[in-house]
Image: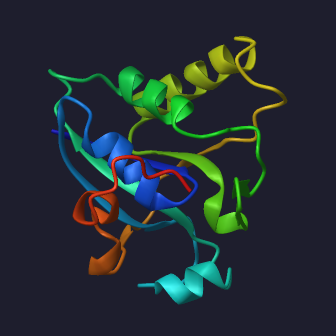
Amino acid sequence: MEKATFGAGCFWHVEEVFRTAEGILSTQAGYMGGSKENPTYEEVCARTTGHAEVVQVTFDPARISYDELLRIFWDCHDPTQLNRQGADVGSNYRSVVFFHTPEQEARARASLAGEEVSGRHSGPIVTVIAPAGAFWRAEDYHQQYCARHGLSSCSF
């Protein structure tokens, strides 16, 4: 089993997209990339901690590859929007791939390069690729929000 962590706007939507993919063992909404230990949702939304809303995915690499996870990541948000996704504005909604291993870093950078020349995006990609740091699990009411509320389409 391996872990991957992605920030692509509101974690409710991102978690639902990954949660329903084949080969995913678990997902958790949370926070990464900031300076405060154990931040709260309110602190992250106030942008006082530097964290991004992220989804940490535990996956079976025999059933889904990291490259396939990257494809899901690129497809579930607009990586050309700096510090926002749609109506959600702020650095906590930034587009970011947090890598856990040197192999993930190499795959993420290659994937980003491929996206930049793909012609699929309306402008320059602003996605950041950074080393994974401490993952802080979001409050229980954020976990599997879309599934618990019966939302088949959970885009924000």
Q: Residue at x 30, y 78 (%)?
A: 141
Which residue is at the front of the view, 37 or 41? 41
Residue 101 x/y as whole percent:
39, 39
Q: Quadrant of the C terminus?
A: bottom right
Which residue is at the front of the view, 78 or 30? 78
Q: Residue at x 37, y 42 (%)?
A: 17
Q: Is residue 90 left or right of residue 16?
A: right
Q: Is residue 77 left or right of residue 82?
A: left
Coloured how? rainbow
Residue 132 x/y as whole percent:
46, 54
Which quadrant of the figure has residue 147?
A: bottom left
Residue that protrudes farthest toward the right in the picture: 123
Residue 124 x/y as whole percent:
83, 31
Q: Residue at x 74, y 58 (%)?
A: 83
Which residue is at the front of the view, 150 or 156? 150
Residue 26 x/y as whole percent:
19, 50
